[in-house]
Image (cartoon, rainbow, N blue to C red):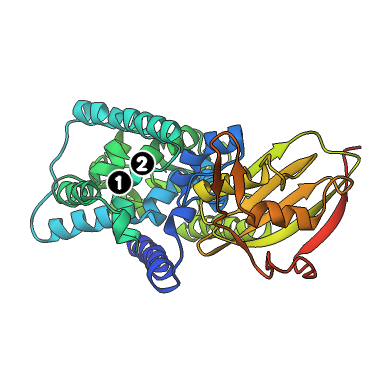
Amino acid sequence: MITTRRIVQLAFLVLTLVGVFVVGGNAERWCPFGGVEAAYGYIKEGNLLCSLGVSNFYILAAVIITTLLLRRVFCGYMCPIGALSEWLGRGAARLGLRPAVVPPRVDGTLRLLKYPVLAIILFITYRAGELLFRGFDPCYALLSRHGEDITFWAYVVAAGIVIGSVLVTMPFCRWLCPLAVVLNAFSQIGFARIKRDQGACIDCGKCARACPMAIPVDKLLDVTEARCLSCMNCVEACPAVKNGALTWGPPRSIGGRWPQGALIAIMLACVSAAVVAAYAFPLPSFSQTRGEPPARTAFVDLNVKGLNCRGSATLFGYFLQRDDLDAVPGYLKIEAWPAPGIGRARIHYDPARCDEAAIKRAITEPYFEAANDNWRVSPFEIEGYDPLEADTPPTSSTAAEPGPS
């Protein structure tokens, strides 16, 4: 069981490294904690923080579903920090450096630290409107190719986790991880659990000593602790497992046991569904609306150079909301998918008062700010559109859409 989990952990770590350093992907867009950080702003304003995408929400949903079914398997099977921390501790133990045993009362107090950590991160993120935690994020320091964005403190935190993992079993995961706070709320009512048969148990205590989260498995009939990773370490360590002393599966009222393969299959199915959903249903990461939609609206899809993050998307909306001679009259709705290099935008408008040419002029023409008596040059370029050629045929897709019934 432990070997199988190690293989799964390694596979996810390799997949992440290949995706970031070979394919050139953005690991932040697939981090479930990014979905937690972005949730408030997206619900309130329809906008995402820079570097994040709606894929964060899909992967967060997948992790929550697996947590409801299997408890915190993300932490025990998929999280790169959890895997590296566990491997360091196991490596140190093989070299003869046994991890310190933290008294239960002290461990319980330290577990509370992750709650203020989460509160502080969310507070400064919402106030600043950007990922300030990135400067301290050990995962970003280890799994990002953007070296200029990684601060000294991120490496300090990463070094602290490395040293701490050698001395104590998975200290960051147990005491400081902010995502654990979110997952604990769902893991508390998780479906699957470790079950102990008192009749078959020989009371050796090996299961409790093997638990990386310091759960007293030998004292419980059902392990319903929110911090359970379903790692199966306790089952592997149990000398009476063949007699059914420890099993993993549905609640006792249902009965039976499940193989570890079922856990892995469910986990992979949820993650795969999240990836497919992110590409099949790419919700905009930035949106603005002005006015009420008329009986009939139209939209134009544009590929825009310079539309690469939340800040540039806000400026993009500023140009479309301009109030000079190139203003867009009437109803306006902006949906954008910022991306490095060239982003995508869908502009909804009132075809009775505006057209595609006016939309393109608003985006690309210099904007005279009367209040400041100043001209602002547009940083945006529309793929296939030359502002100097007014008669250029449209190259973007346009379509009419019905208004509200």
Q: Position of residue 144 (x, y in %)?
A: 35, 60
Circles 1, 2 touching at the beta carbon (< 8 Å): yes
Q: Which residue is drawn at 46% across and 39% down?
A: 37
Q: Position of residue 295 (x, y in %)?
A: 91, 40
- The circle on residue 132 is 2
Q: Nearer the viewer, residue 195 or 100?
A: 100
Q: What residue type is labelled 1?
A: Gly
Q: Position of residue 86 (x, y in %)?
A: 26, 54
Q: Which of 285 and 313 is in front in this view?
A: 313
**What residue sits right under mark 1 in the picture?**
135
Q: Image height check: is 116 above or below 387?
A: above
Q: Position of residue 52 (x, y in %)?
A: 49, 50
Observer able to see residue 178: yes
- From the image, which quarter does the N terminus lie in? bottom left
Q: What residue type is labelled 2?
A: Leu
- From the image, which quarter does the C terminus lie in? top right
**Which element carries disc 1, helix, strand or loop?**
helix
Q: Residue at x 79, y 57 (%)?
A: 356
Observer able to see residue 59: no
